[in-house]
Image (cartoon, rainbow, N blue to C red):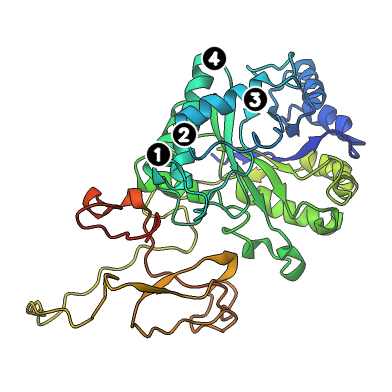
Amino acid sequence: MDMNAKSKIGFHAASGGNKNGLGEWERRLNEAGIPFHIKSSDEYGILWEALAFGDQYGVENNLVFRIVLEKPYDVPDYYINPRDAADEYWQHIIGIDRFPPEFDKERVWLDVLNEPRAQIVFDSPNWNDMHPVAWLGAFSIRIGEIALRDGWKVCLPSFNGGEPNENDYEHPEWLDFLRMCGEYPERIALSVHEYAWSLWQDDPNPENWYPHLWGRLENFIAACDMNGVSRDFTIFVTEFGWGHDGHTIPPVSQGMEFLRWYDEWAAKWPQVRGAALWSLQSGWSDVSNAVQPYIAPLTEYQLANEFDMGEQPAQTYLGTLPGVEPDPPYPPIDPPVEPPLPADNMMTNWSFEDGWDDVPAGVGNLINQQPRDFNLYWHPIGEELWAVNQKTGEFPVCATIPECLHKLNGQLPPNEQVGGADALILDGTAV
């Protein structure tokens, strides 16, 4: 039997801004029995009104709240054990004097983080040299434990649009967090941000923004498939759209077609509870006055349209990622190649014992080293490289010094760590 889904587009809001028509949008959708999605930062009154509409019409809306913490508490402390950092961060959230005493923790999700660091930053190492995504996985598990213990509904970590990197979805700690989300889909959820940035201005076809910008959340589902983790967890896109500033928002007539494409894509993923269109808050180059005109047409569109859920892509190797197939096995070599005979290493100073030279710094002041007396060719910054970018069809330009190998100290065997008998790192904390 065919099943249909309603639109999942909602709104992001906060204090100030132009929200004219938001209450009417809420009332009309709930009056028709349709739940809506709102993510609000700091301003709980918006969600209080949404709860009242839900009570009036017997609808359970998808509501998310975030407390905006001031520096230095706006990001967790990556330098300490992630479980300790989670305990500390949680106390900052619920202990802040702005936390609403009327918060309904049984019906409103608490968005715990906002765009935490998901990339390795060489001058900001993590505790025990953990990869940031692995660290966030352990942090998120501890937050989930607190939520289960104390009766909260939490979502996290609200990765920034375009993050994490494609190869960072399968850290064991992160998979354990997704496993927890699958076990408690009404209490612990994944939250992400998805923006097209300015791409719509150059390429007004959402299919080309997918899956690296819109729809990137499929990477999480694919990672679960490949590792035996349930894909039946809850997902909130807590910030969604085209960009942060008002001038990045497309005209309503064009933008509504973009939103239709997203709804047609999202219909096959019941895990996605809502996507909060950024934003009806003040600031950000008057963004609310660019987004508010969407409220009325979105109301009529959401009342009139349903979308075919179809079937989710099969749970196969990378099956949820479009256009990606497993690499075919390499054909056997015939005749078999004999292994090389052992011989002396003819490369002198190949392991840096006789010193090294710094390569001139690249973007971000990153410095690489080469063994002293080597004569290596480094592509200068700005030089066009030879491998065409398959997404853009253009040749990339060298932006920084390339790396062939990068290992943090804690990622090496003990005998190869700093001070070990076979130390691979002779200076610093990484190789």
* Residue 7 visible within the image: no
Position of 230 compared to 193: left or right?
left
Q: Which mark is residue 256?
A: none
Q: Secondary structure at mark 1?
A: helix
Position of 379 compared to 54: left or right?
left
Q: Residue 431, image x and y in percent? A: 37, 61
Circle 4 sits on which residue?
150
- Look at label 4 and name its amino acid: Asp
Which is more N-terminal, label 2 or label 3? 2
Q: Residue 392, image x and y in percent? A: 60, 74
* Closer-to-camera residue (190/97): 97
* Closer-to-camera residue (35/383): 383
Circle 1 sits on which residue?
173
- Look at label 3 and name its amino acid: Ile
* Dots 4, 3 in contact, CB < 8 A: no
State the image quarter where residue 238 is shown. top right
Which is more N-terminal, label 2 or label 4? 2
Circle 3 sits on which residue?
93
Label 4, label 2: how far apart the Cα atoms are: 19 Å
* Dots 1, 2 in contact, CB < 8 A: yes
Above/below status of 45 relative to 137: above
- Look at label 1 and name its amino acid: Glu
- Look at label 2 and name its amino acid: Pro
Label 1, label 4: how far apart the Cα atoms are: 23 Å
